[in-house]
Image (tube, rainbow, N blue to C red):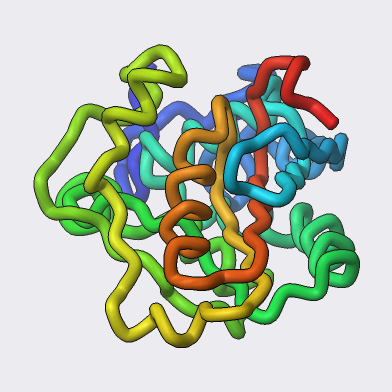
């Protein structure tokens, strides 16, 4: 069974999720699986620096397949489909918290330049909230992917120095309510780190919206 790479002449024509039906024009998922993802929104409040976290759906089933295809097989053409599904939930969150600024959690530039070829979160936000601003930049020193780090304590240490607030953005966030967007939450370490950076320069409040969630029940509000 061949892996499906965009533009490849050699790939399995069966859906990457159900393995039973022919793929749609996207080349990865059948039309049934493509449209079977639906919102199971949750929100969380037990974080040190984040004022609240909102998520669209659990990281399981077809949602997990969606994200794996985008992040590890370069399925950029699935992002508009995912964005269309996520947009109504994101709009409700925006209407509720009324942020002054909307930004995103950036992917490491090495993955953008050499591995994936795009930042999946930025591509998603382009189609769902085009008036976003890019508040952060990533350090250029490559580190182990966060999902391989393990415990929340180790993740916190690992994240030190991984993200920087762009110097020209410090004044922009002062006194503002900020909403950050990411693809997945597991422990909240990344969101907390970015919220700390924003509040250290005077942000009034920081919220996080993630497409998928994989988080312990103790943190669910």
- Rendered view: 98 above or below 153: below
Of the 4 image quadrants, the one containing the C terminus is top right
Residue 37 image offset from top left, x and y in percent: 79, 38
Residue 127 image offset from top left, x and y in percent: 62, 72
Residue found at x 37% / y 30%? 156
* Quarter location, residue 48: top right
* Quarter location, residue 203: bottom right
Q: Can residue 214 be seen by looking at this rendering?
A: yes
The foreground one among 85 and 152 is: 152
Left or right: 95 as drawn, with respect to 201: right
- Rendered view: 62 above or below 148: below
Residue found at x 45% / y 27%? 12
Residue found at x 37% / y 35%? 72
Residue found at x 65% / y 36%? 47
Q: Residue furthest left?
A: 141
Residue 173 image offset from top left, x and y in percent: 52, 78
Left or right: 82 as drawn, with respect to 72: right
Q: How many marks?
A: 0
The foreground one among 3 and 181 is: 181
Residue 141 image offset from top left, x and y in percent: 10, 46
- Rendered view: 137 above or below 27: below
Q: Can residue 21 be seen by looking at this rendering?
A: no
Left or right: 23 as drawn, with respect to 145: right
Of the 4 image quadrants, the one containing the N terminus is top left
């Amino acid at each position: 069974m061949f892996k499906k790479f965009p533009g490849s002449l050699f790939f399995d024509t069966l859906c990457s999720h159900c393995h039973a039906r022919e793929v749609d024009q996207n080349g990865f998922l059948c039309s049934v699986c493509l449209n079977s993802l639906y919102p199971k929104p949750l929100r969380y409040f037990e974080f040190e620096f984040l004022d609240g976290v909102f998520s669209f759906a659990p990281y399981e089933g077809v949602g997990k397949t969606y994200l794996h295809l985008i992040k590890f097989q370069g399925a950029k053409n699935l992002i508009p489909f995912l964005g269309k599904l996520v947009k109504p939930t994101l709009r409700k969150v925006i209407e509720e918290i009324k942020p002054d600024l909307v930004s995103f959690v950036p992917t490491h530039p090495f993955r953008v330049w050499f591995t994936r070829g795009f930042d999946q979160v930025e591509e998603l936000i382009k189609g769902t909230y085009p008036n976003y601003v890019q508040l952060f930049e990533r350090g250029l020193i490559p580190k182990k992917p966060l999902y391989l780090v393990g415990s929340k304590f180790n993740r916190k240490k690992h994240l030190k120095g991984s993200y920087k607030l762009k110097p020209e953005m410090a004044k922009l966030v002062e006194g503002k309510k900020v909403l950050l967007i990411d693809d997945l939450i597991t422990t909240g370490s990344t969101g907390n780190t970015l919220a700390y950076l924003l509040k250290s320069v005077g942000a009034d409040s920081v919220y996080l919206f993630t497409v998928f969630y994989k988080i312990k029940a103790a943190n669910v509000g």
